[in-house]
Image (spheres, grey):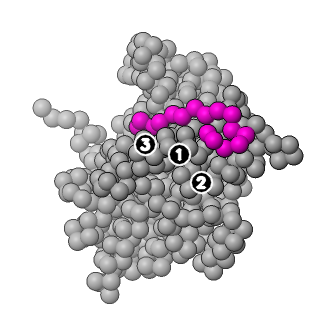
């Protein structure tokens, strides 16, 4: 039996083999992890357990528990002054990942283009292709890993349906200030290009207040805002995200969602509702901890000669390893084999990113210190 | 609270250099600030939190009791003077003024039940102004100073993910 052509050409080559190598090795210090090292705060876990004790084991409405949608409505209202109607403009999804997939399938007609600034999270291109669209990758490596108005104008054409913005960005930690976003937004609005805004790391912004894209002038009707509980609340395994946007688009997404997923696990939804009620303080604590680790890691990397710009959010650093003369993959593989430190080669996140690696600082300070001293040893051997 | 204190409260062994990197200040500034806190008494001391259940020599075995103490406050001095007389005993590891039925909560440590009972009977109860005591011996410690004593399982993350 032959599998579909779209799926067949999907998997990016060498990365998988490298991942398998890491997973097969013991006693590795991993800076390759894309999730918090904290466990979900106890009162959130407890809410999940309690819901099971109380017998909440059924389906929920397709859109998600009303209690959770209302919680999200309030969260967005308080934090950004955004007003999304819990009945028609909010959909609970299995992480942001499902939401993005739903959106692509809901809006794309064959041949529609979706812009994807790179480096980027790995799913945006493949889900576009699966939906019959064409991902158009924009290389931002010469612009400090940021999409600029100039780049944007260059790439938008008549077939451009949307652009995926992800800030703070995985893998670079780059984020944008309001002014930069306003310029981007103007171009998107005037060209009727939908903004697909993945803001799952928004709560982990360190140097300034995160600006939600739909708060920009005229943006709300032209944006689907995605967020979730995975990163800020350390709830990756619960798989809860949400999408907010114009009701026609949310309705279209809900249609697909009801046929494919039905609804997110009720236990997870109950826990997420609790997170919104009582998790704020812990989010702040974790954020302060990440911020300190960021400073530590950036300062160490730069002093080791692995040049690295200061990430403004998320928990990643994206240093250049060009000074070693090694490719991303060679560097990562040799570092793993010789010093048992795992990082992710930059090439996993797009083309033209050879010479970079992604380092996750969602790891204890002791681990980070040990890993960095091993990296130092690795580099010293090559001097 | 100053971030330096926040870091040290979690890890008393954090080095000046590491703290400096974490908060983007010069090591010199951090060092001076810490000295200042130490001098003012904001930082009182640095110590390790030890799980004595895991130490199997007889020397370190200990019994701990929480003792509620009812006292007659003294004119002009209130509870402070009598509290001082109580907390000055080396057996007393903590002493708090509390609301409710009792006035002081005194934590006492001793080698065994006998030494602690003796302390209560012969020292504490006989103090002038002490009206009564209620002694509660600790049977098991679960969590202390924010630290859970049970050895916790590590968060099982897969080693590499996007």
Kindly check if marks 2 and 1 are in contact, taking CB atoms under 8 A apart as contact: yes
* Residue at (45, 46) in percent of width and height: B115
Alpha-carbon span between mark 1 and mark 3: 9 Å
Q: Is residue A24 left or right of residue A176?
A: left
Examine the rendered structure and indicate whether residue A111 appears above or below residue B20.
above
Viewer-nearest of labels 2 and 3? 3
Q: Please tell me whether mark 1 sits on a helix, a strand or a loop.
A: helix
Give the magenta-colored segment's residue range: B125-142
Confirm or deny contact between disc 1 and disc 3 (CB under 8 A): no
Q: Which mark is residue A318?
A: none
Q: Is residue A107 left or right of residue A10?
A: right
Q: Residues within 10 Å of mark 2 (few under 14, many from 20)?
A: few
Image quadrant holding the N terminus of chain A, namely top left
Label placed on residue B114: 3
Compare marks 1 and 3 and give the one earlier in the sequence. 3
Q: Are marks 2 and 3 in contact (CB under 8 Å)?
A: no
Q: Secondary structure at mark 3?
A: helix
Q: Quadrant of residue A222?
A: top right
Image coordinates for residue A96, horizontal then vertical, percent: 47, 37
Q: Are marks 2 and 3 on the same chain?
A: yes
Left or right side of A252 for B96: right
The tally of labels here is 3
Badge 2 or badge 1: first in the primary sequence:
2
**Res B128 quadrant in image:** top right
Mark 2 vs mark 1: in front: 1
The Cα atoms of the two marked residues, 2 and 1, are separated by: 10 Å
Is residue A137 among the parts visible in the rendering?
no
- Sort mark 3 into few (<14), some (14-19) or many (20+) by Cα contacts within 10 Å: few
Asked if residue B140 lies in the magenta stretch, the reply is: yes
Q: Quadrant of residue A323?
A: bottom left
Disc number placed over residue B89 in the picture, else none: 2
Residue lying at 30% horizontally and 55% vertically, measured from the top left:
B57
């Amino acid at each position: 039996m032959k599998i579909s052509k779209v799926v067949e050409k999907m998997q990016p080559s060498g990365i998988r083999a490298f991942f398998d190598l890491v997973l097969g090795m013991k006693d590795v210090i991993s800076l390759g992890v894309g999730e918090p090292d904290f466990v979900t705060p106890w009162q959130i876990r407890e809410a999940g357990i309690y819901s099971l004790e109380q017998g909440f084991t059924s389906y929920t409405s397709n859109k998600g528990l009303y209690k959770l949608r209302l919680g999200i409505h309030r969260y967005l209202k308080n934090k950004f002054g955004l007003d999304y109607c819990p009945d028609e403009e909010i959909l609970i999804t299995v992480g942001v990942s499902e939401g993005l997939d739903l959106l692509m399938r809901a809006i794309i007609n064959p041949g529609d283009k979706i812009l994807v600034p790179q480096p980027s999270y790995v799913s945006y291109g493949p889900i576009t292709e699966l939906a019959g669209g064409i991902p158009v990758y924009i290389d931002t490596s010469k612009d400090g890993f940021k999409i600029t108005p100039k780049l944007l104008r260059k790439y938008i054409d008549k077939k451009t349906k949307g652009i995926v913005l992800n800030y703070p960005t995985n893998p670079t930690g780059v984020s944008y200030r309001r002014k930069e976003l306003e310029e981007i937004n103007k171009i998107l609005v005037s060209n009727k290009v939908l903004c697909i805004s993945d803001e799952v790391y928004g709560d982990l912004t360190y140097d300034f207040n995160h600006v939600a894209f739909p708060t920009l002038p005229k943006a709300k009707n032209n944006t689907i805002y995605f967020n979730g509980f995975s990163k800020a609340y350390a709830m990756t395994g619960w798989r809860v995200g949400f999408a907010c946007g114009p009701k026609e688009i949310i309705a279209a997404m809900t249609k697909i969602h009801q046929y494919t997923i039905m609804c997110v696990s009720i236990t997870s939804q109950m826990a997420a509702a609790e997170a919104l009620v009582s998790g704020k303080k812990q989010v702040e604590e974790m954020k302060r901890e990440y911020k300190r680790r960021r400073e530590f890691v950036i300062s160490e990397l730069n002093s080791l000669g692995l040049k690295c710009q200061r990430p403004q959010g998320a928990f990643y650093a994206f240093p250049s390893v060009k000074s070693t003369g090694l490719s991303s993959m060679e560097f990562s593989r040799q570092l793993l084999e010789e010093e048992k430190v795992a990082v992710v080669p930059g090439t996993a996140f797009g083309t033209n990113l050879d010479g970079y690696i992604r380092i996750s600082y969602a790891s204890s300070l002791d681990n980070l210190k040990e890993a960095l001293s091993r990296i130092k040893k690795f580099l010293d051997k090559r001097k | 609270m100053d971030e330096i204190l926040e870091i040290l409260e979690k890890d008393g062994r954090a080095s000046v250099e590491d703290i400096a990197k974490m908060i983007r200040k010069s090591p010199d500034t951090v060092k001076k600030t810490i000295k200042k806190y130490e001098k003012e008494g904001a930082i009182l001391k640095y110590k390790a939190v030890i799980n004595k259940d895991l130490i199997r020599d007889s020397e370190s075995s200990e019994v701990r009791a929480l003792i509620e103490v009812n006292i007659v406050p003294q004119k002009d001095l209130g509870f402070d003077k009598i509290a001082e007389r109580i907390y000055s005993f080396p057996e007393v590891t903590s002493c708090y003024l509390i609301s409710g039925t009792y006035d002081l909560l005194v934590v006492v440590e001793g080698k065994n039940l006998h030494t602690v009972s003796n302390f209560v009977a012969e020292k504490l109860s006989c103090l002038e102004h002490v009206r009564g005591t209620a002694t509660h011996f600790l049977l098991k410690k679960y969590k202390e100073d924010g630290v859970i004593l049970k050895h916790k399982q590590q968060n099982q993350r897969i080693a590499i993910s996007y």
